[in-house]
Image (cartoon, helix red, strand yellow):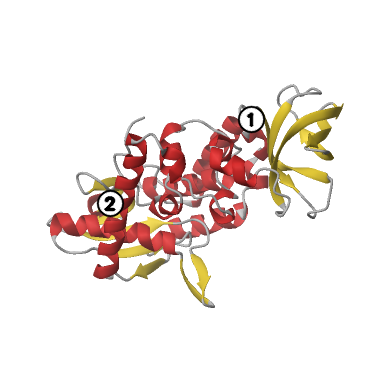
Amino acid sequence: MEHIKFISPSNFFYWEKCPLKAIYSKEFRGQQIFPKHPDADLGSIIHAFFENKTQWNIFSLEAFEERWEMEINKLDEAYKLNNLQKIYFPIKWNAKYFAVKKDLLKKSLLKKNQLSANIIHKNIKFEKWIDDGKDVGGKVDQMVFNEQNEIIEIIDIKTGNIFELVDKRRVIKASYIQQLLLYAYMINIKQSFYPKCFIQDIKGYKHHVEINEEIATDIYKKALELKNKINKGINEEKIDQLACPNIENCSNCDYRPVCTKYKTRFINNFENKNMDIYGVVFDVKGFEKLELKIQIESKIFILKNISAYESIKKGDIIFVYNLFCPDGNSQILFAMKQTIIKHE
């Protein structure tokens, strides 16, 4: 197994909580385990509009609408051809606040006080890789340069909610702040001063993130420690010991089907509304929408509204992920859009 070469600033917050995610993200890169919520792909499209405004000539309502339809249609076609993703076709019906985000993006790109195309092209670079030369690295959404080609601003674009409540105070999410501070620290290494840091929302508003040098240094040191910890686990062939299974880390993790520690601790945990189960198929009814009876230890559970992408027959030993459990005593479980079945 290859070592982790760089700690990604955008993933550092989550990798620190469960270092095994870093290994799985590399090992299963390009493989789709669960259906991906369309919010992520809609976010990528919005990022592309900010990045390519000049190249795509998005300086009129007509140009925006034409390009938007082109990009959304392209994504919809990809969804239709993907057995996992087609549950989210069309994206406009399934992505959260689709129409609102489109309208906000349009207003942001076409507002009168936008810089000219020439200035944007000259002073701003998009999706530019930055690293410290050995341990930490990733792509910054936007970098603003001065005439000496020094980085004076870094801007991270977020298309969803950028705030969280801490002690009843509304603050920028800790994961976003850590990401920016890691980028800023690496830039400071190269040019001996920190750039200004901003989070830009979909409206085009820039929210300033203050640089605390002590905190930035501490986060960078933690990133180095994390890399050493992960690669030590790889060297010693003890990657399972890097797992930190708990509800917060595991409930929405994409790697649950391949994580031994998760399966040992949280499969068949009826304390949660959203749950995963493991058992033997006792009976199968229906055609496109199935009703399954599953034996888990000495109990029989009924699974309703299961969409089958592969054959399921009596006696199969299966994992079923993303079920809704009304309460801990219920023996009837309900499929959701994201529900998938994997054979043992």
The reply, left or right, for residue 2 in relation to residue 276 is left
| Percent of width and height locating residue 100 | 59, 57
The reply, left or right, for residue 291 in relation to residue 320 is right
Residue 172 in view, yes or no: yes
Callout 1 secondary element: helix
Residue tagged 1: 80
The quadrant of the picture occupied by the N terminus is top left
Callout 2 secondary element: helix
Residue 139 in view, yes or no: no
Residue tagged 2: 224
The reply, left or right, for residue 143 in relation to residue 80 is left
Please tell me which residue is depicted at 77% across the width and 37% down the height of the picture: 297
Please tell me which residue is depicted at 79% across the width and 22% down the height of the picture: 313
In depth, the one of 268 and 238 nearer the eye is 238
| Percent of width and height locating residue 284 | 85, 27
Residue 151, quarter of the rendered image: bottom left
